[in-house]
Amino acid sequence: MSDVEVIPRYPLFINGETCEPLSGEYAPVINPANGQLVAHVAMGNSDDVDFAVASAQAAFDDPAWRKMAPEERSKLLYKLANLILANAQELAMLEISSSGGTISRIMGLDIPAIADLFMVLAEEVKTYAFVENLPARPLPEPCHTQVWKEPVGVCGLITAWNFPLLLFAMKVAPALAMGNTVVVKPAETTPTSTLRLAEIFAAALPKGVLNVVVGEGPVVGEAMSLHPHIDKISFTGSSNIGRKVQENAALTMKRVSLELGGKGPAIVMPDADIDLLAYGALFGVFLNAGQACESGTRLLVPDSIYDAVLDKLVEVAGNVVVGDPMREGTSYGPMASETHFKSVLDYIASAEAEGARVACGGRQAKVDGFAGGFFIEPTILADVTNTMTVACEEIFGPVLSVIRYTDLDDAIRQANDNAYGLSAGIWTDDLVQAQHIAHRLKAGSVWINDWHMMRTDAPFGGCKQSGYGREFGRYSFEAYVETKTVSTAFQRDPSKKALFRMVHSKFV
Ligand code: NAD
């Protein structure tokens, strides 16, 4: 039997149905836990993007979609949430087999959060101020002004491979809630769950509202960011590509939001509970094998307790289980691809070359029964300085850099002395001082005595080179609306309209 007969094929999803890519080309999807082929996925090109955009444009032009009442849209979002829950098992399996995320994380965290996000927005959309009445104001005669929020149009949504379904939901849910239509481009290495969810959603959505075009970033992603009929791009990925997307989008003056990388600093205060911070800091960096933009990767520790904290971190890291993502109890699985696996090991080698010390881990992790898997040991780097490559750049792996500081000003200076500004944290028992420190940290989110404290109803996003715009909750709506000001004058007699006199001297 040939591969083609046994390995599932995933075509594109355009205009409410699966469709073959115009190039006829398919690419392999590899399970990073064992290196095996799990699917063939269609590779779209710019012509497929044109077709998807035309379908999305036609769907947007239908007033039944664009002008749907908020109560109806709310019901629709609830329906989509229920479809996610009803198909959770299948979606989770697709996500695990392409991204290497663990079953406990995907079933316990991602799927409930994704469904919850649709439900949160289903409630928020009912009370969102689509129409705001401004107080009457004479200009100089009385006029009435309303501020309307309208959908932007066709939105291009480009996502990364680390949390494929979650990143999809963070963009699709608010875009649809505001009445836009979308063309989604998932990462080409992890497209299967996105394609399947689009197909599942088709039971509830009009044709053309949600389209998915898989393909290489420089082909499909670039065609989207340059496309004259895509009105907005929301991008999640690396800062380098984010910059390129922004440059391309500028040519047609598209609206852009960017969710980019991070290099989360966590400040350990001298009074911190060492047990809590050790478990917490490692949760912050080992969740999803460190392949999370908001990971806490720089732990800033005062000289006075540096050795004690390091010893505790190494002890706790010894209990972290690297292995089969399908097994409950696995802490984290493989790196999502071989290329990425090699890049993480290169970063660890660079740290040693620059004078850091590997306190634990640092190598490929051997996992019984998964000889072809791209696993990396839980790694803690000691004696890292804030200027070393591993402290400046996003590694995106299970690697914690432990950095010394002398006093609080030094800690805050080092925390902020980085190109990124996504997440930051503080470990302390002094919650009043923690609030003061939070004011001084340049980050979109600050977490006190925990990590990954993302809520589907609280804004999430970055500053500096972590991008701009906010996702989650009602805050995410602003990225998917245009503001229109509609003013009405009531004076019907032209001679009585004071400002007319400036042009029409007969009324003076
Ligand atoms: P990436 O930038 O390489 O790719 C992201 C997406 O962009 C993919 O779909 C890719 O195909 C596409 N792309 C590539 N070249 C393109 C181009 N020229 N034009 C348009 N699109 C193009 O990032 P990645 O390696 O897939 O993901 C990891 C990065 O994503 C990390 O930096 C991580 O921090 C970031 N990330 C950020 C968040 C957040 O919310 N801030 C969340 C998850 C991941």
Image: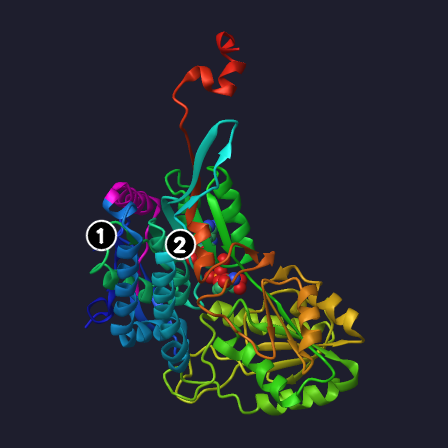
> Which residue bears the numbered disc 2?
128
Q: Residue furthest top?
A: 506
Amino acid type, mark 1: Pro
* Image quarter hosting the N terminus: bottom left
Q: Residues within 10 Å of mark 2 (few under 14, many from 20)?
A: some
Residue that appears at 40% across and 28% down:
490
Whether residue 53 appears in magenta in the rendering, the answer is yes
The dominant secondary structure in magenta is: helix
| Above or below: residue 92 compared with residue 227 | below
Quarter residue 13 falls in = bottom left
Classify mark 2: helix, strand or loop. loop
Residue at image x 53%, y 43%? 247
Three-letter amino acid code at disc 2?
Tyr
> In the rendered image, which residue does mark 1 sit on?
206
| Camera-nearest residue between 173 and 52 | 173
Above or below for 498 versus 206: above
Left/right placement of residue 431 relative to residue 57 reads right
* Residue 402 or residue 254, whichever sits in front: 254
Q: Is residue 400 left or right of residue 342?
A: right
The span picked out in magenta is 40-63
Q: Position of residue 313 (x, y in %)?
A: 63, 87
